[in-house]
Amino acid sequence: MSVLRFLTLILLFTTLLGACGRSDLIRIRLLTPVSEGKKDHSILTETTESSTPIYTNTSSGGSLYFLFKSIGLGYTTVTTNFEKTSLKLKETTTLKTNFADVAFGIGENYSFMWGAGILTGGERITELDYDNNVPFKLTNNYLGGHSLFFVLGHHGFGFETLLGYRTNFIKAEFEEINSLVIGKTNENFTYESNKISFTTSQVQLGIGFTF
């Protein structure tokens, strides 16, 4: 991160802290992803690829938070679907993740909430199909990670409207692909490692209830 961006974040946080102030409300917040960051989460590369692949990213799920004044706990489940389609290769991944979150909040009529989450469970299913052959799946040996998030809120008459952004940092390890089927030495495909790290990001919208 550049110095300018870092200073901008510090200035923004300081401004929000000064404008919002400490919260004395009890809040229940519900959020759901409405947009998934478009990124390449594919594992395999087609060595003879002659066209530009098409990438599709979608997400679903939700977050539930309970805040007592300025601190709270939450639970988030996010399912990210990714598809890469090229001339002969189709790679489809479904990533299901569950996070235990801790959150901090400031503000009354206008509020700012931020926090982090730890991956507590999930699965990653990747299905590969080459040249309309019978698809096969990759099995994960390990799935772990964490997340960071922030939420802006506007309060009025016991309800809140919420806008949030969440970034999830995931590490996964899958079983080595049998080179007789489709491996590192296969003339049609290549992959760098069976240990991968990737990031997913979601824009979230939601509502809240205050007491």
Image (cartoon, rainbow, N blue to C red):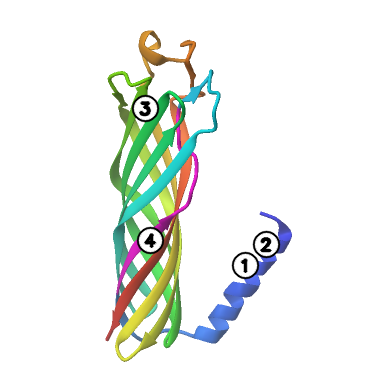
Q: Residue at x 60, y 77 (%)?
A: 14
Which of the two residues, 134 or 16, is positioned nearer the viewer here?
134
Disc 3 crowd rating (10 Å Cα; few below 14, some 14-19, many 20+) is some
Q: Is residue 22 above or below residue 11?
A: below
State which tag comes first along the sequence, 2 or 3. Answer: 2
* Mark toward the start of the polypeptide (1 vs 3): 1
Q: Magenta residues, as a range?
A: 29-43
Circle 4 Cα neighbour tier, 10 Å, few/some/many (<14 / 14–19 / ≥20): some
In the image, 207: left or right of 186?
A: left
For disc 4, the marked residue is 34
* Residue at numbered disc 2: 5
Amino acid carrying mark 4 in the image: Val
Marks 4 and 3: CB-CB under 8 Å? no
Against 112, residue 177 (above or below) is above
How far is the residue under mark 1 from the one under mark 4?
Answer: 24 Å
- Residue 126: horizontal and vertical position, in percent? 34, 32
Q: Amino acid at mark 1?
A: Leu
Q: Residue furthest bottom?
A: 157
Residue under the point 38% across and 61% down: 34
Which mark is on residue 118? Answer: none
Q: CA distance from mark 2 to mark 4?
A: 26 Å
- The quadrant where residue 116 appears: bottom left
Label 2–label 3 contact, CB within 8 A: no
Query: Residue 181 at what x, y percent from top left?
Result: 36, 12
- Indicate whether residue 206 is drawn in magenta: no
On screen, 45 above or below 122? above
Nearest the viewer among 84 and 147 is 84
Image spot of residue 5 (x, y percent): 67, 62
Mark 3 secondary-structure assignment: strand
- Which tag is nearer the camera, tag 4 or tag 3? 4
